């Protein structure tokens, strides 16, 4: 098919799957839709890409506009384009996976969101559009990365103990990890280093504190 | 930004990075553009997504129309959307990574391609649009996968020796691999199994033949 100017163009949106750990729980940020279609249903924050802005910029903007959340790790996840995924017109959505470190999880609903709140990532309400598929893809991407990357550290505070990191992995994976295997695996990945300090919080005896090896891996 | 129907829509295209191994060389399929912009330059096969077809179907169709190639492993790579990436209008391109097994590498130029040919993936001519970035992303994805997936087996014949597989890895990675480490790593991945037969082709002594463990991992 040669390039032409006169064929119908689809609409293009971005949708953002923002994960955080709150009180040890693995959660995703949803907004309740204030407008049709799917008015009143929960959905991912997102919206149209402006004709002159990059996809990544659109993702940042929509997240900020609809939820008040700023400055998070953000990577492109996948593009969803089934012809019937939106009842209004052909809408192709470029989904982003975003991670928010703890302590910054205050959200405010705005723009076309009636409400914004955190939901357990593994126990979501019915979602608008194909957003359940998008969340499932994002969870799969994050879980797959745990085994060979430093991605999960984006969800941790600046300093943490190995038991705290293990608890984070368990929350994301949804299953307990063997303590010795976990320590061995994490240390072999070479993504954390001891700070030289110890922590007494929550532990029966002092536990060594760790931090991400390369602070440059934190994108926020 | 609320949903509206009257804002300008971008054009959406698919571009396909098709890799194969030919005579031991790691190659990518390019077409020479028959029309402006970038008329006469080499580019990735691709084109507009029809308003009623899925992204994946568009990728298959464009690859077939422009190069005659059918039935290959195909996965979504990344979506490229910089506002200035096409001189004509805003064009967002969903890129696909495709792999072609050996012996099926005949190509024919058609549609808006003046010519279609294989080029060394690590030594490309100047490409149209941002296609050099797209190829670089595809090479990075494939190389990254070699260490923990069966993806490279899509580029192998149905049966192969470990030295043949090592040669394929070396061609893709662009650097020699230590023979003992390679064998150990590949066998630990649990992606190949012996067929029980041996091969005499090319080797000083008979070498065991292997195949992909799960034939279902071959998508073609």
Image: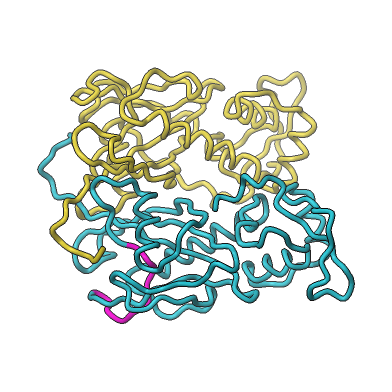
Chain colours: A yellow, B cyan
Give the left or right position of residue B82, taking residue B178 as reference.
left
Spot occupied by residue A96 in the image (x, y as percentages of width and height): 40, 42
Residue A20, placed above or below residue A211: above
**Residue B219, percent from left and from top:** 55, 50
* Segment colored magenta: B37-46
Q: Is residue B95 above or below residue A28?
A: below
Mostly what secondary structure, the magenta segment?
loop
Q: Do we see residue A60 in this rendering?
A: no
Magenta run includes residue B195: no
Query: In the rendering, at what x and y percent does residue B178 appear?
Result: 79, 67
Q: Nearer the viewer, residue A22 or B54?
A: B54
State the residue at coordinates (45%, 64%).
Answer: B69
Report whether B146 appears left or right of B66. right
Counting from the top left corner in percent of width and height, residue B51 is at 23, 48
Q: Is residue A204 left or right of residue A147?
A: right
Q: Quadrant of residue B44?
A: bottom left
Q: How many marks?
A: 0
Above or below, B127 relative to A197: below
Quadrant location, the N terminus of chain B: top left
Q: Nearer the viewer, residue A211 or B145?
A: B145
Q: Write down the quadrant of residue B108 in the picture.
A: bottom left
Residue drawn at (61%, 36%) of the image: A159
Q: Residue at x 27, y 58 (%)?
A: B48
Say if residue A149 shows up in the picture.
yes
Check the image and name the residue furthest to the left: B6
| Residue drawn at x 64%, y 67% as measured from the top left | B173
């Amino acid at each position: 098919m040669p390039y032409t100017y006169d064929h119908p163009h689809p609409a293009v949106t971005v949708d953002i799957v923002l994960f955080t750990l709150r009180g040890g729980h693995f959660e995703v940020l949803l907004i309740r839709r204030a407008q049709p279609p799917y008015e009143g249903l929960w959905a991912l924050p997102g919206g149209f890409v402006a004709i002159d802005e990059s996809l990544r910029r659109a993702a940042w903007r929509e997240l900020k506009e609809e939820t008040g959340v700023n400055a998070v790790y953000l990577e492109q996840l996948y593009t969803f384009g089934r012809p019937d995924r939106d009842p209004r017109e052909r809408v192709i959505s470029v989904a982003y996976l975003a991670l928010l470190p703890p302590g910054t999880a205050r959200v405010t609903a705005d723009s076309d969101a009636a409400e914004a709140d955190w939901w357990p990532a593994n126990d979501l309400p019915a979602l608008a559009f194909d957003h359940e598929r998008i969340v499932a893809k994002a969870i799969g991407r994050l879980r797959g990365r745990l085994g060979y990357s430093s991605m999960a550290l984006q969800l941790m505070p600046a300093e943490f103990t190995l038991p705290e990191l293990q608890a984070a992995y368990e929350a994301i994976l949804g299953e307990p990890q063997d303590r010795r295997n976990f320590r061995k695996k994490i240390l072999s990945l070479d993504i954390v280093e001891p700070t030289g300090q110890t922590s007494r919080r929550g532990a029966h005896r002092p536990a060594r504190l760790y931090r991400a090896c390369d602070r440059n891996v934190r994108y926020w």
